[in-house]
Image (cartoon, rainbow, N blue to C red):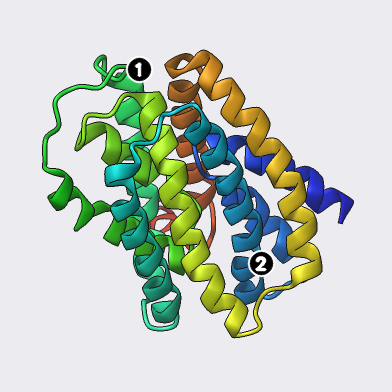
Amino acid sequence: MAALAAISFLAGFVDSIAGGGGLLTVPALLIAGLDPAQAIATNKVQGAVAAASATYTFGRKGLIVWSSAWRFAGISFLSGIVGALCVQFLPKSVLDGLIPVLLVAIAAFFALSPKVGNEDVHARMTALTFGLTVPVAVGFYDGIFGPGAGSFYMLGFVTLLGYGVVRATAHTKLLNLCSNLGSLLLYAATGAVVWPLGLVMAAASLLGAQVGSHLALRHGTRIIRPLLVIVSSLMALKLLVDPANPWHQALRALF
């Protein structure tokens, strides 16, 4: 439990800024002896608490526009439930092949785009269109698996709605919270959550998220942008080196 708490603190810190903490905590839970379903379900407890902690900090600073954000949040919540319901039907190979490609694209975008900063820019789509696409797709993914969902939300807010990095991070945490809560409710109803582990990890994750969100508020794009690049790249690398990943198998067949 002490080891899981330490990992959760780091995961909460990373999650509150760039997302991806689940790729630390889910493997840790598997090593601790949980089966995959229990690991994903239990991870939702610490993920939801970390997102709630960060959302509170950003919201208190007035960085969340509640008049529009609550609609996105509601869609993410429902999509998280649907994703958790469909987890048994979607072939895992689809996620294994698609997610590393998306993460590499996110890392490249934030590393190379000179326009990504703290200031808002012109939106490329309406709030209605955004609400019917990004929260639906990412919330659904968050319900099925989760790690990296924050990076996907973040990319949507920056590229499609034109949000500055800090404001995008604030709204990302809110949507992350809602899709986590939606899937957590379903996983809890099925008895898949190991609550003693989940609550210990949640407490540590809350502290990590507080540290991370305060650093994000203080340093803005100077810390958020490089962390997004690093975390997205490491997540992609971790998935690609997994022998079960179809890209790993394809590369081995070639070389």
Residue farthest right in this picture: 2
The disc placed on residue 190 is none
In this orientation, which residue lies closer to the viewer: 92 or 55? 55
Q: Earlier in the sequence, mark 1 or mark 2?
A: 2
CB under 8 Å between callouts 1 and 2? no
- Marks 1 and 2, Cα distance to the nearest angstrom? 34 Å
x and y, in percent, of residue 193 in the image:
67, 74
Can residue 246 be spotted in the picture?
no
- Disc 1 is placed on an element classified as loop
Whether 156 is drawn above or below 110: the answer is below
Question: What residue is at 54 percent from the left and 47 percent from the top?
Answer: 238
Whether 210 is drawn above or below 120: the answer is below
Question: What residue is at 66 percent from the left and 55 percent from the top?
Answer: 46
Q: Which residue is mark 2?
A: 42
| Quarter occupied by residue 119 | top left
x and y, in percent, of residue 51 in the image:
55, 47
Packing grade of label 1 (10 A; few <14, some 14-19, many >=20) is some
x and y, in percent, of residue 157 in the image:
28, 37
